[in-house]
Every structure is written in structure tokens, then in C-alpha cells.
Amino acid sequence: MTMRLSIAFALLLAAPAVFAADQKDAARPAFPRGIPKGVPKAPKMGPALSNPGSPVARLYRATPEERERALEKLPARMQEQFRQQLARFDAMPKAQQEVLIKRAERFAALSAEEKAAVAGLMQEMRKLPEDRRRELGLAIRRMQPLSAEERQRRIESDAFKGRFSADEQRIVIGLSQVMTP
């Protein structure tokens, strides 16, 4: 008798969990996995935008020992920020790392005036509202995998001109010259 009571009690305790699991599955709509055929894929994009003129970009190619020697000379708070940025860089796939290294090298090769112009464009972009800044960043990232001719066609398109103001177009065009591989 006590065995039957124990089993009944265990079933009674388990019933709400089973019922809740059924309800949870019923409430969740069934979505097919993957992208259905005929749906266009998102355009290819390059790696996230980063400031190619930042001091940490100079440490991308450095060995861990060289990085550590350079970081030791900085204030503690800056050391932590640089270490976080370098950790993000180290976690990227090699192809993205190479793009960022080339971007930093391209920036380093610019004249002082050109560097100042790029820094000014980045400041202008940072001052934009978040939604516009995101749109400009996406436009620049979408230009990264394009050839120079394809980039030029995109810049000259009515869609591009209709999507961005004259100032935003200037920012996208100026930064895409440095940010593209």
C-alpha cells in the first residue's frame, strides 16, 4: 500500500512538470532551420570597424613579449583596455586579423594630413545618432569585400545617394578608402 502511495505521490509531483513541458512546446512555433530556398542571403560584410589609427593597432603584429613590454609603460586603466582589445583581436579568425593589420598599415602609410582627415571623419561619425552611425558602419562594412569598381558603382548608385545625406556620403566614402582591404 505504501508503495502504491509513493508511486502515486511521485506521479502527482511530476505531472506539473510534464504538463508545463507540453505547454512550452505547444506555445513555441515551429520554424524551419536554416534559410529557406529562394530567400536572398545577407550581403557579405568585412570585419567590424575599428580605428586603424588607435595605438593598440600598432601592437597587432607584436609578439606577446613585445606587447607586454609596451603595455607595462601605460597607466593601469589603459593597459586593461588595450589587453581587452588585443584579446578580441587574437580571438578573430586569421583572415579578419589580416584585414585589420593591413588597415592599420594602410593608415600608418598615410601622410599626416590624410591621417588627420580620417580621424576627423571618425569623429564626425561618432557624433551621429546611434541609428545613423550603425547605417554608415554597415555601408562601410558592405563595401569591404567589393572591388574598387564595385565600390565606385555603389557610391554612384541612386540607392546610395538616396540613403545617405551629403555629409554621410562623404564620411562613408572617406572611411571606406581606409577601411577596405
Image (cartoon, rainbow, N blue to C red):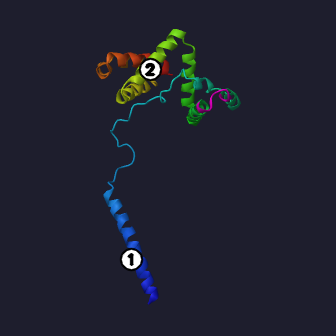
Q: Secondary structure at mark 2?
A: helix
Question: In the image, residue 45 lies at what x, y percent?
Answer: 44, 29
- What is the tally of numbered marks visible in this picture? 2
Dot 2, crowdedness within 10 Å: few (<14), some or many (≥20)?
Answer: few
Find the magenta span and give its range.
71-77
Front-lying residue, 138 or 147:
138
How crowded pointer 1 is (Cα within 10 Å; few <14, some 14-19, many 20+) is rated as few
Q: Viewed as shown, does residue 125 lie left or right of 109? A: left
Q: Is residue 61 above or below residue 149?
A: below
Residue 169 position within the rendered picture, expressed as x and y whole percent measured from the top left:
36, 17
Q: Can residue 76 be found in the magenta stretch?
A: yes
Q: Is residue 16 above or below residue 79?
A: below
* x, y percent for residue 95: 55, 30
**Which amino acid type is marked by label 1?**
Leu
Q: Which residue is mark 2?
A: 123
Label 1, on which residue? 12
Is residue 150 visible in this depiction of the protein? no
- Please report the residue visible at 39 percent of the width from the left and 76 percent of the height from the top: 12
User: Cα distance, mark 2 to mark 1?
Assistant: 64 Å
Marker disc for residue 142: none
Residue 31 visible? The answer is yes
- Relative placement, left or right, of 181 versus 137 is right
Precedes in sequence: disc 2 or disc 1: 1
User: Is residue 35 magenta-colored?
Assistant: no
